[in-house]
Structures are given as structure tokens and as C-alpha cells.
Image (cartoon, rainbow, N blue to C red):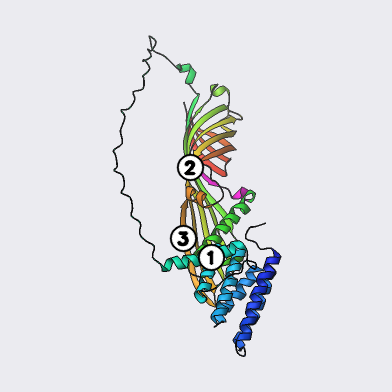
């Protein structure tokens, strides 16, 4: 069980305490006015909701009391009600704010241990002690003098032993003779268009849900800077997903058996730009009241530089135009940015105001603020089909459709020598 969630007997005691305080206040005064009747009904509704564990509804009723009540005892009682409701929702910031407000209305306020949980009473005592300490300036203690800074002692760099130079064999050394490399090497350059739209159904809901929650948290954090501590009651989102990107690269390919076989392998260096786009409305409702609706636009962008090893089989290598199959793997260092832009309105206490913000984070900053890790190494899986056609002897054109951690449409030229 959550250490802040109160058991039902404790809820009943707290509700009874609020009710008794309300009855005592009513009997001590004169004939209740219409506003006082409204305050009394709100206290009864708030205490009942709290007793049933509906803390969000209790927040709304206690908060409305603070806008109607004139008696400082009632204001202090409502502030304690708001504080214990926020505390039951694991919001210590909200609880602390309203405990401080209760002490403003009633500086001699006391909480009964047998009615309130011990941890809540301890929080109240800490806040009251803070107020007492703030009224008395703390004595200044002398600070010790900083020790003198000594310059670091630098050791001379160590000399690494150098291996003796190796002698070249007389007459020179030949890796490949003329007959060894003829028609076995090919260089290639290409441009590509990239996206994941055809396969986005595999992960779309995961990405859009996380982005919607991030926008929701960003909006709530901004509103809490200007309004009383808010508690989110619910939210709706209709985030859509899109993607685009590009790729270009250069590679060298080797045919072990020359033109006798269509098998080859290549080492290539690629630059891929990837952009994931999430956009749509996000609506939230809050306790003790209010709502917001914003139109959001979020992007994830990265441009990894990768080294790739690929293998290719040409089905009919003797023809001038031949289809082929290819597959391979690549590795890249992964870095990039996550950006959020949102604009909309907030309705609170009968007023409507415009809100908005724009935030850009690096992948490292996103990792620090969330419960997931972004890998530093990006693994690229590549396989697909294409067509290779000879334009003039030695020069060929290439068209390919393949999977490259997404859908890749590629065009390029290759020269064989």
C-alpha cells in the first residue's frame, strides 16, 4: 500500500474532525447567511468525498470554500482540507502550500495525531518550524579560510617503445596482379528517400502515447507556475504520426569471381537523416477546476553517419539488365534532438487565457528526464530488391526498394573496373 494513501478508518476520523469543527463554528456564530449555508454544504460534500477516497472531488469543494468563506477559522479548516487531499494524492508540494496558507489564517493551528496520519502531522510541524525560523535571523558562522591552491605536479610523458621497421622483400610486394583485380571492383554512389510510414502501425501507438504524455506533462508544469497546484483528472489526445528522411552514401564493392558470378560484398559509408513527426490536439481537465486544450507538434530528428557491410546476389549477371537481392548490417553513433511546440488555451476560475511554449532537448537531456534509455549505438538492418542496368561498358545505373530501419527508395550509379 502507498505510504501516503490513508486507510478508511483514518479517512473517517479526518472527515469527523472536519465535521465537528464545522458544527462548533456554526453554533458559536449568529444566524447563518446564504453564503454560510453554501459553505456548510460544501464542507459536508468535501468531507464526504474525502471519506470515500474521492480526493479530486474533495479538492474542488474545499477550494470553492476558500473563495466564499469570510471567517478565518473556516478558511484555515478548508486549507487543511486541501492540504490533506493533496497529501493523499502524493503531492507534497500542494500539501505544503496549503498548510502554509492554513498557518496564515490561524498561526496557532494544531493537528491531532490520532485523526491525521503521522507523516502528515510531521510535515505540518516542519512547515510551522520553517515559519518560526524565518522570523529569526540565523547567526553567521565564520567561514574557514580556503587552503592555498598548489600547482599540479606534471610527470614527463612516457616514451612508448617503437617496433623495429620491417624490411620489404627484394623486388617489391604485389597484393593483386592484373588478372586478379580486373572486373572485380566496383565503386558506387547513391541517393535515397527514407520513411517508416508503411510500417508505422508496429510502433505508432507507443510513440504517440509517449509524446502525448510528454506534452501533457509540459502543459501541466507550465500551468503550475501561474496557478494553484493543479491535479490532473483526465486527458484526451488525437496525435497522428508521420515521418520523412533522406540518405546518401558512397561504397566500394568486390566480386570475388569477377563476371563469372553475381555474388559481391561492399563496404559503404552512409549519411541518413531521420525525422519523426507527431502532431495533434491534447486536452486536459484539472482539479480543483479548469481545463486546457493545445495543438501540439513534436519532432524527433537524428542524422547518423554509419559504416555498412552488405552482400548482393545478381540473378542473371551475364545480362545487361539484371535484378538482384541484397542484405547487410550497419553501425552508427546515435545523437539528435527532440522538440515540442504547443499552443492553445486554458480555462480556470471562469477565465480563458492563451498558453504555449517551445522546447528543444538533446537525446541525452531526454534520457535524464524520462524513464527510458536511448541507445548510443544505432544498428541498421538492410535488405531489399533492386535492378542494375548497364548504361555503357563499365557504367551502370541502380534502382532499389529496400528496408533500412524504414522504407528506402534508392537510385545510384556504379562504375566497374
Choose between 259 and 136: the one closer to the eye: 136
* Residue 223 picture location, percent across and down: 51, 67
From the viewer's side, name the closer residue of 107 and 60.
107
Mark nearer the N terminus (3 vs 2): 2
For disc 2, the neighbor class at 10 Å (few under 14, some 14 to 19, many from 20) is many
Report the residue at 59% width, 30% height from top.
314
Mark positioned earlier in the residue sequence (2 or 1): 1
Q: Circles 3 and 2: CB distance less than 8 Å?
A: no
Position of 413 with respect to 138 (left or right) is right
For label 3, the residue is: 358
Task: Tell me the CA gap for discs 3 and 1.
Answer: 40 Å
| Dot 1 alpha-carbon crowd within 10 angstroms: few under 14, some 14 to 19, many 20 or more | some
Name the one closer to the observer, 60 or 235: 60
Contact (CB < 8 A) between labels 3 and 1? no
Position of residue 107 measured from the top left corner of the image (x, y, whole percent): 50, 74
Q: Is residue 311 above or below residue 88?
A: above
Q: Is residue 194 magenta?
A: yes
User: Which residue occupies the extreme bottom position in the image?
Assistant: 31
What residue sits right under mark 1 in the picture? Answer: 125
Q: Secondary structure at mark 3?
A: strand
Is there any visible trace of residue 89 in the rendered image? no
x and y, in percent, of residue 76 in the image: 55, 76
The magenta segment: 192-200
Identify the residue at horizontal 57%, vertical 69% (top origin). 83
Amino acid at each position: 500500500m502507498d505510504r501516503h494513501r490513508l486507510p478508511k478508518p483514518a479517512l473517517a476520523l479526518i472527515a469527523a474532525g472536519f465535521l465537528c469543527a464545522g458544527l462548533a463554528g456554526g453554533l458559536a456564530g449568529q444566524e447563518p447567511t446564504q453564503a454560510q449555508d453554501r459553505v456548510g454544504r460544501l464542507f459536508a460534500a468535501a468531507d464526504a468525498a474525502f471519506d470515500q477516497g474521492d480526493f479530486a472531488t474533495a479538492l474542488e469543494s474545499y477550494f470553492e470554500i476558500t473563495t466564499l468563506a469570510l471567517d478565518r477559522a473556516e478558511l484555515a479548516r478548508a486549507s487543511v482540507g486541501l492540504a490533506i487531499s493533496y497529501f493523499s494524492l502524493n503531492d507534497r508540494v500542494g500539501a505544503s502550500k496549503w498548510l502554509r496558507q492554513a498557518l496564515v489564517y490561524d498561526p496557532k493551528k494544531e493537528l491531532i495525531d490520532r485523526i491525521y496520519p503521522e507523516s502528515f502531522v510531521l510535515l505540518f510541524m516542519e512547515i510551522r518550524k520553517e515559519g518560526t525560523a524565518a522570523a529569526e535571523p540565523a547567526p553567521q558562522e565564520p567561514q574557514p579560510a580556503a587552503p592555498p591552491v598548489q600547482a599540479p605536479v606534471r610527470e614527463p610523458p612516457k616514451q612508448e617503445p617503437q617496433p623495429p621497421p620491417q624490411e620489404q622483400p627484394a623486388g617489391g610486394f604485389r597484393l593483386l596482379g592484373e588478372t586478379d583485380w580486373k572486373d572485380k571492383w566496383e565503386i558506387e554512389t547513391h541517393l535515397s528517400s527514407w520513411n517508416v510510414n508503411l510500417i508505422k502501425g508496429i510502433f505508432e501507438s507507443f510513440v504517440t502515447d509517449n509524446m502525448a504524455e510528454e506534452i501533457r506533462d509540459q502543459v501541466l508544469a507550465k500551468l503550475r507556475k501561474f496557478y494553484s497546484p493543479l491535479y490532473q483528472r483526465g486527458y484526451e489526445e488525437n496525435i497522428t504520426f508521420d515521418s520523412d528522411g533522406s540518405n546518401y552514401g558512397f561504397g566500394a564493392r568486390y566480386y570475388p569471381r569477377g563476371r563469372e558470378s553475381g555474388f559481391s560484398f561492399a563496404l559503404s559509408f552512409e549519411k541518413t537523416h531521420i525525422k519523426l513527426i507527431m502532431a495533434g490536439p491534447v486536452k486536459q481537465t484539472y482539479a480543483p477546476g479548469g481545463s486546457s486544450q493545445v495543438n501540439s507538434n513534436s519532432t524527433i530528428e537524428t542524422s547518423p553517419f554509419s559504416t555498412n557491410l552488405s552482400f548482393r546476389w545478381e540473378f542473371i549477371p551475364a545480362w545487361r539488365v539484371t535484378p538482384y537481392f541484397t542484405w547487410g548490417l550497419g553501425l552508427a553513433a546515435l545523437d539528435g534532438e527532440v522538440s515540442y511546440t504547443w499552443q492553445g488555451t486554458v480555462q480556470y476560475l471562469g477565465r480563458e487565457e492563451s498558453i504555449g511554449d517551445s522546447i528543444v532537448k538533446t537525446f541525452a537531456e531526454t534520457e535524464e528526464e524520462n524513464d527510458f534509455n536511448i541507445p548510443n549505438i544505432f544498428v541498421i538492418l538492410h535488405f531489399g530488391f533492386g535492378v542494375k542496368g548497364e548504361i555503357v561498358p563499365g557504367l551502370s545505373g541502380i534502382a532499389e526498394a529496400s528496408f533500412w530501419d524504414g522504407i528506402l527508395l534508392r537510385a545510384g550509379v556504379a562504375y566497374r573496373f
